[in-house]
């Protein structure tokens, strides 16, 4: 499609990320439920007003990550992935919780990508909310299994221009964008039509769509599969091989963002 009108916004803080994003991408879709602080997962909005460190979390958020039940497992998983998206490898988030048998578990979640390293000391800004949300969406897996992906975008930490990664991850899966921290949280995905079958063969179905026994496409948790990326996103940037922006709706007033994670598969 043609160029999408995008309102320019100040980019968030960036750091140094590994050249290849070869890390665990198996976030359970149930952990993304924005209204599920109790019983299913840590509500992302519980993190939003504060710095991402144990002393600044709200009592509700601390209760969620220390819950010994299955709900607590989802909360901890979401927090682990959130830290991985936001913090640098030199940063970490540590806390402890006690299970039903009285055993204390000391957790340490380390950063990976470094999208918002300064979230450790100050609240998360709007643009950074979108970056972290897109990252979490891209790392979600229908089956809860790990698949190595190449994540690219209009940010220094995931711009792969001139890297070997462009030649080793050549199958375009699609793109992810949204805002889990908004008053009405949302996440969007789009797919590359030519590679939908290939994505499914690698157990990556949150953009392609999971097919049920009757052949109907199922959404991946709260992720809304919009359709083909050619309809919803600007043409691929051919240097870094990423979508510069994607739009939430094709009708009405323009509502697009440059905080997009474009995913390629090997």
Image: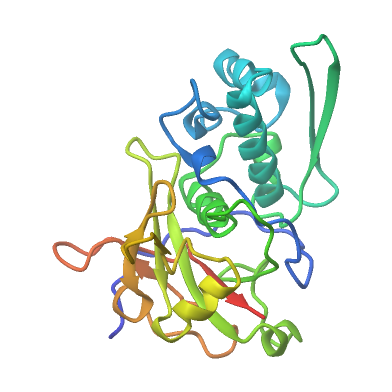
In the rendered structure, the answer to whether residue 193 lies left or right of residue 125 reads left
Q: Residue 168 in the image: state x and y as whole percent.
A: 72, 86
Residue 262 in sight in this render: yes
Task: Identify the residue at the far front of this view.
Answer: 213
> Looking at the picture, how far across and down is residue 69, in whole percent?
64, 20
Residue at 70% over, 36% down: 120
Is residue 188 toward the left or the right of residue 146 in the image?
A: left
Nearer the observer, 100 or 58: 100
* Residue 6, image quadrant: bottom left
Tell me the residue at 72%/56% (across/down): 24
| Quarter assignment of residue 47 | top right
Count of all numbered marks drawn on residues in the image:
0
Q: Residue furthest top?
A: 102
Question: Does residue 203 sit above or below 44 in this rendering?
Answer: below
Residue occupying image coordinates x 50% and y 40%: 30
Q: Nearer the viewer, residue 152 or 104?
A: 104
Can you tell which quarter of the image residue 100 is in? top right
Taking depth in this image into account, of 9 and 131 the one nearest to the observer is 131
- Left or right, 55 with respect to 30, comes to right
Q: Which is nearer the eye, 49 or 75?
A: 75
User: Quick check: 39 above or below 43?
Assistant: above
Location of residue 246 with respect to 61 vertically, above or below: below
Percent coordinates x, y for residue 106 in the rendering: 85, 25
Residue 6 seen in the figure: no
Placement of the C terminus among the 4 image quadrants = bottom right
């Amino acid at each position: 499609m043609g160029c999408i009108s995008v309102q320019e916004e100040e980019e968030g803080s960036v750091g140094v990320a590994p050249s290849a994003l070869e890390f665990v991408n198996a976030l359970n879709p149930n952990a993304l439920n924005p209204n599920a602080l109790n019983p299913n997962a840590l509500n992302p909005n519980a993190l939003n007003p504060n710095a991402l460190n144990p002393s600044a979390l709200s009592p509700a958020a601390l209760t969620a990550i220390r819950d010994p039940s299955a709900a607590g497992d989802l909360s901890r998983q979401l927090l682990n992935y959130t830290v991985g998206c936001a913090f640098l490898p030199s940063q970490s988030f540590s806390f402890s919780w006690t299970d039903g048998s009285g055993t204390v578990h000391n957790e340490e979640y380390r950063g990976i990508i470094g999208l918002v390293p300064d979230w450790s000391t100050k609240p998360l800004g709007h643009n950074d909310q979108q970056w972290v949300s897109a990252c979490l969406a891209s790392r979600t897996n229908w089956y809860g299994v790990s698949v190595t992906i190449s994540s690219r975008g209009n940010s220094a930490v995931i711009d792969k221009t001139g890297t070997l990664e462009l030649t080793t991850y050549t199958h375009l899966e699609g793109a992810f964008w949204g805002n889990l921290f908004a008053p009405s949280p949302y996440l969007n995905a789009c797919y590359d039509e030519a590679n939908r079958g290939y994505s499914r063969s690698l157990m990556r179905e949150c953009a392609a769509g999971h097919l049920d026994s009757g052949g109907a496409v199922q959404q991946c948790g709260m992720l809304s599969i919009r359709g083909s990326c050619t309809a919803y996103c600007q043409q691929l940037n051919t240097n870094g091989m990423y979508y510069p922006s994607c739009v939430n709706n094709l009708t009405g007033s323009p509502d697009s963002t440059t905080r997009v994670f474009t995913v390629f598969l090997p």
